[in-house]
Image (cartoon, helix red, strand yellow):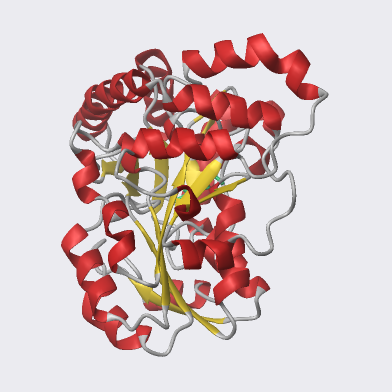
């Protein structure tokens, strides 16, 4: 996937998708952001409607105590309150992590979510990108190079390629010295197929390692992207370093309340997973059977890559947007990825049909 040309792209800055990555007025269906296809949890919506007027004029709890309790209850793995940090989205915690632990060097497998790169560059770090090979982590090279790094970032499921091997991740974490801090971003893990998807997680290992931070988010799983709530868990010593530069009242009161309600709504996740699995199968089947220039890649989660034959990802994105108002993610904005892939979210059936119709329109042109 990563050729010498795209290696050059390793030095260029990455960027995000979403409707504000283009002219938002052109977008009628956004398949470039991967959030819960069912949207906000009903529980959360009710809680917001009930308390928005009171919460809007109150300062929120700066320590997010009730939210942290809600997170611990939801995780149910016997952690202490001091293990949890809450952020204005997982993105804030990525930056807190970089500020706390990165001085000179960071290692990032590529392609992956670009905020690790942005946060590391802000700290003035030299970034070592280690390309995935056929969408698989280069475990040996990562272990060899990790010795010299302040921190490494792993993302599982990896955005944009999907689930990585938990065995490989475990091996990396077990092999490297605790002076190198490891962030494992599991923001999509709850949307992986199957009620037993926590088997892919490293969250119950945090007390075994001095250097491990697990990142989660409610923006994807519970559809709270606009409200911005993410959290991390790690041992209390790391957690206090991680939150040392936290800005007071970083998570607003409405978001805290919505998150507490959402975490009690686990059926929302189960329903979303069922939709994702069924719809992804339908979408991939129709692309495989009916389209000439698009090949879907394997996925176990609420997004998948599509390989383009004889087409350029920017042109495909722009032409789908202008012809149909459908926005897909141009993957050339992932460091190291080149112009051969787009990424799409899995949504509800009616919306997926709109995407597939839009793809068919540009398929043979
Ligand atoms: C892997 C991954 N982690 C974290 C985030 C950001 O999460 P949040 O919206 O909670 O900041 C994203 C957003 O796309 C992501 O893809």
Q: Position of residue 237 (x, y in %)?
A: 49, 67
Left or right for 205, reference 258: left
Left or right for 26, reference 364: right
* Camera-side residue of 256 and 123: 256
Quarter where residue 165 is shown: bottom left
How many labels sit on residues?
0
In the rendered image, the vertical position of residue 288 relative to residue 336, given as above or below: above
Q: Position of residue 349 (x, y in %)?
A: 35, 16
Residue at x 61% of width, y 53% of height: 92
Residue 27 seen? no
* Camera-side residue of 343 and 230: 230
Left or right for 265, reference 50: left
Q: Quadrant of the N terminus?
A: bottom left
Q: Position of residue 89 (x, y in %)?
A: 58, 44
Residue that sits furthest to the bottom in the current view: 148
Quarter where residue 241 is shown: bottom right
* Camera-side residue of 58 and 229: 58
Residue at x 44% of width, y 63% of height: 338
Q: Quadrant of the C terminus?
A: top left
Residue that sits furthest to the right in the current view: 57
Q: Position of residue 23 (x, y in %)?
A: 70, 36
Residue at x 53% of width, y 44% of height: 230
Residue at x 56% of width, y 77% of height: 102
Residue 124 seen? yes
């Amino acid at each position: 996937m990563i050729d010498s040309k795209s290696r050059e792209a390793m030095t260029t800055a990455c960027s995000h998708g979403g409707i504000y990555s283009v002219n938002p007025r052109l977008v009628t269906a956004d398949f470039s952001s991967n959030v819960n296809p069912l949207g906000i949890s009903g529980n959360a919506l009710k809680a917001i409607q009930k308390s928005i007027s009171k919460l809007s004029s109150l300062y929120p709890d700066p320590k997010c105590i009730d939210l942290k309790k809600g997170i611990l209850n939801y995780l149910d793995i016997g952690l202490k309150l001091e293990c949890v940090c809450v952020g204005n989205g997982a993105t804030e915690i990525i930056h807190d992590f970089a500020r706390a632990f990165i001085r000179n060097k960071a290692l990032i497998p590529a392609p992956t979510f670009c905020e690790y790169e942005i946060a590391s560059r802000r700290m003035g770090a030299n970034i070592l990108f280690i390309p995935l090979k056929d969408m698989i982590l280069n475990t040996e090279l990562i272990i060899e190079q990790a010795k010299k790094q302040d921190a490494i970032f792993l993302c599982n499921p990896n955005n944009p390629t999907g689930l990585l091997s938990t065995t490989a991740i475990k091996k990396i974490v077990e092999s490297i010295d605790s002076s190198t801090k490891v962030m494992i971003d599991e923001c999509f893990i709850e949307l992986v197929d199957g009620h037993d998807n926590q088997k892919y997680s490293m969250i119950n290992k945090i007390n075994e390692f001095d250097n491990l931070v697990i990142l989660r988010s409610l923006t994807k799983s519970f559809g709270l992207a606009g409200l911005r709530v993410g959290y991390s868990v790690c041992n209390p010593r790391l957690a206090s370093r991680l939150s040392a530069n936290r800005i007071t009242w970083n998570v607003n009161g409405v978001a805290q309340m919505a998150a507490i309600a959402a975490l009690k709504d686990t059926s929302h996740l189960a329903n979303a997973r069922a939709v994702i699995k069924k719809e992804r199968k339908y979408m991939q089947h129709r692309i495989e059977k009916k389209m000439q220039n698009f090949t879907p890649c394997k996925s176990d989660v609420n997004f998948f890559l599509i390989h383009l034959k004889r087409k350029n990802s920017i042109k495909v994105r722009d032409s789908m947007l202008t012809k149909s108002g459908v926005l897909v993610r141009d993957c050339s904005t992932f460091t190291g990825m080149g112009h051969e892939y787009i990424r799409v979210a899995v949504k509800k059936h009616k919306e997926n049909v709109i995407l597939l119709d839009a793809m068919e329109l540009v398929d043979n042109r």
